[in-house]
Image (tube, helix red, strand yellow):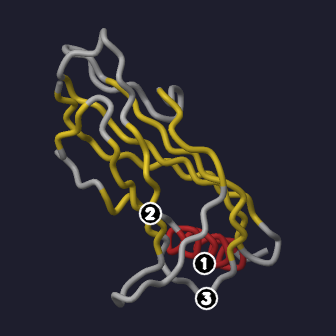
Amino acid sequence: MKPASVILPLLAFATSVAAQASHIGLPTAGTRVHKGQNMTVQVVVPNSIMGSIEVGIVLSFQYCPLPNPCPNPTNQLGSILYVGKLEAKFHEIPGQPYENFTITIPDYDFWDPAPAQIIENRFHLIGAGPAAVLETNTVAVQLQN
């Protein structure tokens, strides 16, 4: 078997997975959030010619008390804010499909102002196989009182 016959399909698959990768459009990094605040989390899913079957999404909020860094979001999700289906759609403004979710920042008395992160975990199936893909995306925010 020639190395190119193995490497090229793997490279094509990796490229297609990267092209399917979602990201958090809103809020932007550094946004100040307040305990108990309702806010919009926008999950953007790039348009692709490869089919994708959405299985589910989890949005969560991870408090990161100083002086510690935020925990790895693949090991610790924090407070779960939404669990359900992702149904990203094109909207009136040209661009990529997205879905907006309204979440509420947890209001725990023991939380002081500190860094935090909003976490998106998306599980979907891609390709004819299909292949299972679990993505984790975060955006750093600043928790205020």
Compared with 36, 32 (above or below) is below
Compared with 134, 94 (above or below) is below
Quadrant of the rendered image containing residue 11: bottom right
Identify the amino acid type marked 1: Ala
Name the quarter where the C terminus is drawn.
Answer: top left
Q: Which of marks 3 and 2 is in front?
A: 2
Tell me which residue sits at (39%, 28%) in the image: 106
Q: Which residue position holds label 2?
A: 100
Q: What element carries label 3?
A: loop
Please give left or right for residue 64 compared with residue 14 in the image.
left
| Marks 3/2: CA–CA distance | 23 Å
Q: Between disc 3 and disc 1, whose residue precedes?
A: 1
Using a 10 Å C-alpha cutoff, classify the residue at mark 3 as few (fewer than 14 neighbours), some (14 to 19) or many (20 or more): few
Tell me which residue sits at (68%, 77%) in the image: 9
Q: Which residue position holds label 1?
A: 12
Identify the amino acid type marked 3: Ile
